[in-house]
Image (tube, rainbow, N blue to C red):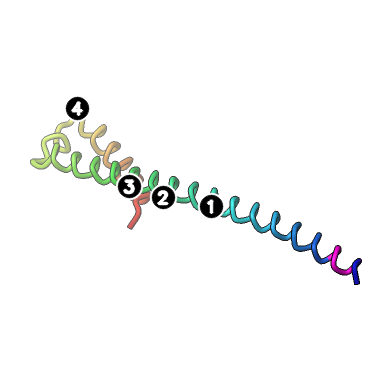
Amino acid sequence: MITLSIILSVVIVVSFFVIRNLIKQAEKLEDIQTEYEDFLTKQSEAIAACNVRLKEIDNRGIFKSDDEIGWFWEELKKIQDALNEFTIK
């Protein structure tokens, strides 16, 4: 009977420490996930702001129609379109 009590006590103490460590790890992962979500939100906002700014810059189509920088403008718009795919919707 005493042996059983000692074994159960050891199992309970070990279980306590294992559970405590698992809870700490879960909390750390939640913190990392929150930071990651904040990072994604900020990146998404920056991409959206850049998209709005590009549309404001060429609202009259001046850059698009200019032969000298029109190709550059089109490439810039392609890059922005690719970035738009990475925004959080």
Which kind of residue does numbered mark 3 sit on?
A: Ser
Q: Position of residue 84 (x, y in %)?
A: 32, 48
Task: Say whether disc 3 or disc 2 marks the residue closer to the N-terminus.
Answer: 2
Which kind of residue does numbered mark 4 sit on?
A: Glu
Residue indicated by mark 1: 27
Q: Nearer the viewer, mark 2 or mark 4?
A: 2
Which quadrant would residue 43 be assigned to in this image? top left
Question: What kind of element bears circle 4?
Answer: helix
Task: Say whether disc 1 or disc 2 marks the residue closer to the N-terminus.
Answer: 1
Tell me the distance, in whole angstroms, between the alpha carbons under discs 1 and 2: 15 Å
Which quadrant would residue 12 be assigned to in this image? bottom right
Specify the label residue 44 is tagged with: 3
Q: In the shown orientation, is residue 28 left or right of residue 53? A: right
Q: Residue at x 14, y 37 (%)?
A: 57
Q: Position of residue 77 (x, y in %)?
A: 26, 41
Q: Residue at x 65, y 52 (%)?
A: 21
Q: Alpha-carbon neighbours of circle 3 within 10 Å: few (<14), some, or many (≥20)?
A: some
Q: Nearer the viewer, mark 4 or mark 1?
A: 1
Q: Is residue 52 magenta?
A: no
Q: Are marks 3 and 2 in contact (CB under 8 Å)?
A: no
Q: Are marks 1 and 3 in contact (CB under 8 Å)?
A: no
Q: Alpha-carbon neighbours of circle 2 within 10 Å: few (<14), some, or many (≥20)?
A: few
Question: What kind of element bears circle 2?
Answer: helix
Tell me the distance, in whole angstroms, between the alpha carbons under discs 4 and 1: 55 Å
